[in-house]
Image (spheres, grey):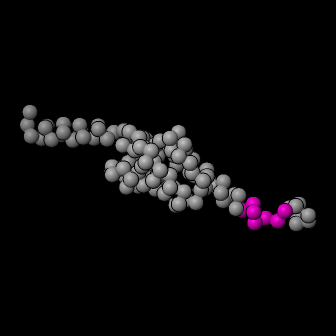
Amino acid sequence: MNADSGQQLEAESASSVRAGYAAPESEIERFIASLWEEVLGVKPVGLHDGFFELGGDSLLGTKVVSRIRESFQVPFAMRQLWANPTVARLAPIIEELVIDDLLENDNQDEPRGKPDGHV
């Protein structure tokens, strides 16, 4: 085996290790991945990486939950992280909470009663 063949085999092995990696795409996915990278000290965090498989535990989960609540101003619970431990599963949960919060705040601004403004 020559040096070029050895380097090619090494490159193929390295790429097959990361073949399951899917990069976060949406803003919320990137936020979660970045947060996990910071809290867990692991880079890169992909869409399908599991929080607990990457070394997360209940103490680190509490930090993640707190940062999500603070950043998005939503009622995010620890059980949501436990039930949805990947970026891909967690992002839609947070997105739904944000949308619900926006809709709730929007409805509070509307006058009560009939749509034409009569009560």
Residue 99 in view, yes or no: yes
Vertical placement of residue 91 versus 113, above or below: above
Q: Is residue 11 left or right of residue 53?
A: left
In percent of width and height, residue 76 lies at 57, 51
Residue at left offset 41%, top offset 40%: 52
Q: Residue furthest top?
A: 1
Position of residue 31 measured from the top left corner of the image (x, y, whole percent):
46, 56
Range drawn in magenta: 106-112
Examine the image and state in which quarter residue 104 appears: bottom right
Residue 30: percent from left, percent from top:
45, 54
Tell whether position 109 is magenta. Answer: yes
Q: Is residue 30 left or right of residue 98?
A: left
* 30 relative position to 4: left or right: right
Q: Is residue 97 magenta?
A: no
Query: Is residue 30 visible in this depiction of the protein?
Result: no
Q: Is residue 47 above or below residue 105?
A: above
Find the residue positioned furthest to the left: 2
Kindly identify the residue that appears in the image at 69 percent across and 57 percent down: 103
Between 79 and 84, the residue placed more toward the observer is 79
Image vertical order of residue 112 relative to residue 49, above or below = below
Q: Quadrant of residue 73?
A: bottom right
In the displayed orientation, state which residue is furthest to the front: 59
Residue at figure coordinates x 79%, y 64% from the top left: 110
